[in-house]
Image: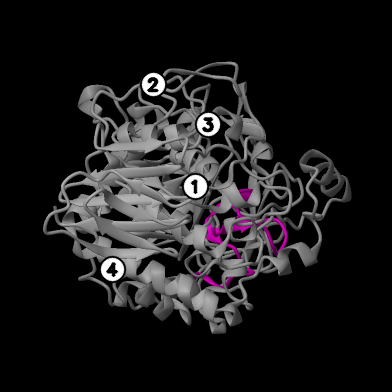
Amino acid sequence: MTRFELWAPRAQRVELVAGGRRVRLRRASGGWFRSELPLEGELDYAFSVDGAEPLPDPRSRWQPHGVFAASRTLPLEPFAWSDAGFRAEALPRAVFYELHVGTFTPEGTFAAAETRLEHLVSLGVTHLELMPVAAFSGERGWGYDGVAPFAPHPAYGSPDDLRRLVQACHSRGLAVVFDVVHNHVGPEGCFFARLGPYFSERHATLWGPALNFDGPESDEVRRFFIDSALVWLREYHGDGLRLDAVHAIHDESPLHFLEELRIEVERLSLAEGRPLFLIAESDANDPRLVSARRDGGYGLDAMWNDDFHHALHVFLTGEHEGYYRDFCGCTDLVEALARGFVYAGRYSGWRKRRHGRADPRPRGSQLVGFAQNHDQIGNRPRGDRLSASLSPARTLVAAGIALTAPFIPLLFQGEEWGARTPFPFFCDYADAALRDAVRTARGDALDPCARETFLAAKLDWSELDDPQHQRVLAWHRELIALRRRTRALCAGALLESDVFCSEKESWLVARRGPYLIAAHIGAAPATLPVGSIAQTRILIACGAGHRLTAAGLELAPDSFALIGPL
């Protein structure tokens, strides 16, 4: 027997359409329709509401023919997991690697990604963060326009292909993080509005109507998205979730959706006897996301720190367009390293208002820091990486700062070897008017709807044969190895007064425990004041010149050095 169910609170009749037959489901309480039917094995099915055209199951675990087609039941045989003893590295000691399945390999599949895991192991990362893999319209896309949040995207492979990838990661000591989207759904292939009040009548987002998390009949909507999040942890053995753009989750309930999700994930963690974590992306700079629930927070484990990225980017590139105009490079980079957020109640000229909230107990181990990620690359008109605008030497400095900062570090695929391939925004919508609207709205230099734009984003693994790329890769490996074996360099206390800079000469010095970190990108050699240097040595360095003297640390332009112990 197989149980079929659908929440359709305004429907009079719901029929299961499968195998050329229509079977009426029984009405249950709370707007549900349910029946157990003598149907077994893999079966394509859909639901017809009040005689209308059949629609896929919103809780479908498998959409083999895409999000417009019928859903499919999964085989009865359970997957043979063998990772019972795996436990993810604790977040303060973690190094994240963000990966887009469709462009990580030429094949763009879960199975192909599995063949590259040894590269990640040798790099030294601990957590593989998958950009959203829930099914979306078309074959190619970033994944943030998903419409089937319980099912893996069919172009990447089957549910068991994804399970095999996770199991392969765990067998190599790699944790897996699923990126999930609870602030909106995609503009195409979503049938929620035909089934029930999934969308809010009071709130909206930049991407369209907000999800109904606090209005009439919102309980089942909340349950739907919480259940979808738990699927990636329970049925696919994920170790954590990255929650996309939580500032766009509009919920005025006394128990916010994010806090309820935290509670449910804690219950699952206790039931399964393994740690599970939640990391938020937020544009609000609100420390309440990671504050304990007893202190009025939501209790999430960490959040992305865009301020650190923006300050580092301006320091390295000198760009001041768009939101970068709010940052002044060296000074704000010091502020980020010292206190976490640059904007914690400070006036933002870009926003024309004060932005952010001060954290009374800031901790670097609750912030994810990065020199690059999918957004900060992909939202540029050409999707160009730092390697396209910085000298090879300065890309090494960028890695040096990011991988010794007091935050949880994250790398974006290919960053570890200075990949030259771009990562522009791309999509594959079926509707011509929607494609035109996307082109007009984004105004990118590359057509986001063209297949060529997607193909250009695929990593070129042959770059690793080039000595220059090998040098960048070796530098990342050395930095990550040093970080992981040195407790003082893991994510932890922010630097407060132990970091300072020269805006005029473009250098920065930071102290982390018994170690000093120094970076210099000025036009001329500089001597950095590093205090007492007796019985110290340079542990790792890059650049044309670096030397400890009685006067301090001499660095050539575009150089980085870590010295100690003091």
Q: CA distance from mark 3 to mark 4?
A: 31 Å
Does the magenta run of residues contain 424? no
Range of the magenta residues?
Answer: 133-160
- Examine the rendering and report whether any part of residue 184 can be seen: yes
Q: Which residue in the protein does label 3 denote?
A: 327
Is tag 1's residue or tag 4's residue first in the polypeptide sequence? 4
CA gap between label 1 and label 4 equals 28 Å
Camera-side mark, 3 or 4? 3
Instruction: Work out which quarter of the rendered image holds the N terminus and state it.
Output: bottom left
Q: For numbered disc 3, what is the local secondary structure?
A: loop
Q: Is residue 228 above or below residue 497?
A: below
The residue that label 4 is drawn on is: 481
Front tag of 4 and 2: 4
Give the x, y percent position of residue 421.
65, 66
Above or below, 537 against 281 in this view is: below
Residue occupied by mark 1: 522
Q: Which one is nearer the viewer's eye here, 529 or 47?
A: 529
Residues under labels 4 and 2: Cα distance? 34 Å
